Each structure stands twice: as C-alpha cells, then as structure tokens.
Image (cartoon, rainbow, N blue to C red):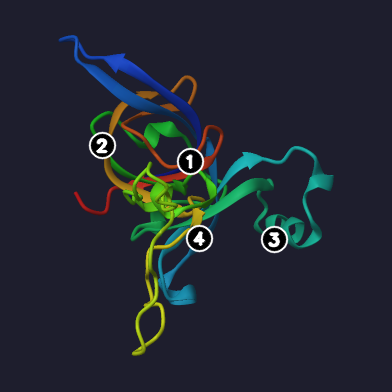
C-alpha cells in the first residue's frame, strides 16, 4: 500500500541514537486522517485518494457547498483536504481512517509545505548579493546595481534577480528519513528541517525518488 498522510508541523528537537549520535528532527502531528473520496482511471482518468484532516465539530462552520459534498459522501466534514495520486486507490475505502502507523522508522518520504513568508526583501537578503562599499561616501551599499541594457535591446531581461516577495511558496523536500513513529500520540519524527512555520499544514507521502 502506498503511503500518504496530512499533518501539522509541531517544531524541531533532537534525539539520540544508541551510540550517542545526535539527530536533529522535526516533529509532525501526522493524522489521523480520513479517506474522503477516491478517483479512478475509469471515472476520472487518473488514480488518487482524497484525505481529510482535522474534523470540524460545529456544523455551522461548514459552508453549504462543502457541507453538501461531505453529506453526499457520508463522511464527517474536515478542515483540510488533499488529493494524493496513488496507483492502488482500490486498497482504500471511503471513510477509512489512516494514522501515523502507515509509516515506520527508516522510510523515505517527501514533505510538501508552504515556506515561511518574509515579505518584500531586497536583493542582498533575497539572493545573497554582496552589495557595494560600506564607507567613503560610495552611496552604493545594498542596492541591486544596474538592471537594464544599452540601446539594444534596451530592456530588463526576464528572470533578472531583483527585489521582491520572498518566501510564502509551496516547497517540497524530498527523500527525508523517518527517524521514529510514536503511534500513541500520532507523532512522526523526521530527520532534518521541513518547510513552513510551527502549526503549519504539511503533506507527507512515500518518496518518489528512492
């Protein structure tokens, strides 16, 4: 069975192996999730399952279109929905609950999340530009420098590194190691850092590139 789940980033800590090696890990509250819907090749042209995370307890917090969607599928409404493309959607049933135990220590996973937004930043912070002289009245410290061209073609080329919005993008980190699974509290310890700030939603699935 292919593995996938929705989780919430808790924060970072470290764990020790039996030989005393320190491993930095990210703690993820992974699940429990519910299979809300399925996509099949015959009906939709592709194979996938749709998972729901964080059950909505008050019916008034669900708008009418989504309320009708959940009612039609006969599942409880959930705050977050995510579709995962899998080849074995037949192994899942609508309403089936998935928890952190779909993974085990040693698994390779891909984690997708939204990177921390840093607002509008200059070229020095955004791309690591060196900047100009800091003294002797240069008047050129953290500016990006020349951005245009001469008479021909007389325009700024596409892709030019310039000041702009930094962060806040969908980022996927591939081939991370699952260090430990704690089924009692649905916690997943993942080696290294993953995108997003604490309490942000992340999508975890079995690594594509093993």
Residue 3: percent from left, percent from top: 36, 45
Dot 1 or dot 4, earlier in sequence: 4
Report the disc number at residue 69: 3
Q: For label 3, count other residues whose C-alpha is less than 10 Å away and answer few (under 14), some (14-19) or many (20+).
A: few
Q: Residue furthest right?
A: 60
Residue at 30 percent of width and 43 percent of height:
109
Residue tagged by mark 2? 107
Q: Is residue 166 left or right of residue 76?
A: left
Secondary structure at badge 3 equals helix
Residue tagged by mark 1? 196
Residue at 37 percent of width and 44 percent of height:
136
Vertical placement of residue 191 versus 21, above or below: below
Residue tagged by mark 4? 38
| Observer-nearest of 122 and 177 | 122
Q: Residue furthest front?
A: 136
Dot 3 or dot 4, earlier in sequence: 4
Of tags 1 and 4, which is closer to the observer?
1
Residue 134: percent from left, percent from top: 38, 42
The Cα atoms of the two marked residues, 3 and 4, are separated by 13 Å
Of tags 1 and 2, which is closer to the observer?
1
């Amino acid at each position: 069975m292919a593995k996938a789940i929705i989780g919430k980033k808790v924060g970072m800590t470290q764990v020790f192996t039996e030989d005393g090696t320190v491993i930095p890990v990210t703690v993820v509250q992974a699940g429990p999730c519910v299979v809300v819907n399925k996509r099949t090749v015959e009906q939709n042209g592709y194979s996938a399952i749709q998972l729901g995370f964080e059950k909505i307890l008050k019916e008034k917090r669900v708008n009418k279109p989504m309320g009708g969607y959940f009612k039609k599928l006969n599942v409880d409404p959930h705050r977050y929905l995510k579709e995962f493309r899998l080849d074995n959607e037949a192994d899942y049933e609508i309403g089936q609950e998935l928890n952190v135990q779909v993974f085990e220590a040693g698994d390779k996973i891909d984690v997708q999340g939204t990177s921390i937004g840093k607002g509008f930043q200059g070229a020095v912070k955004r791309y690591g530009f060196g900047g100009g002289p800091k003294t002797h009245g240069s008047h050129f410290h953290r500016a990006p420098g020349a951005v245009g061209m001469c008479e021909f073609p007389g325009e700024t080329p596409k892709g030019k590194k310039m000041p702009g919005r930094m962060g806040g993008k969908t980022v996927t980190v591939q081939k991370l190691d699952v260090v430990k699974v704690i089924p009692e509290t649905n916690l997943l310890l993942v080696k290294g850092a993953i995108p997003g700030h604490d309490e942000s939603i992340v999508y975890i699935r079995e690594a594509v590139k093993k």
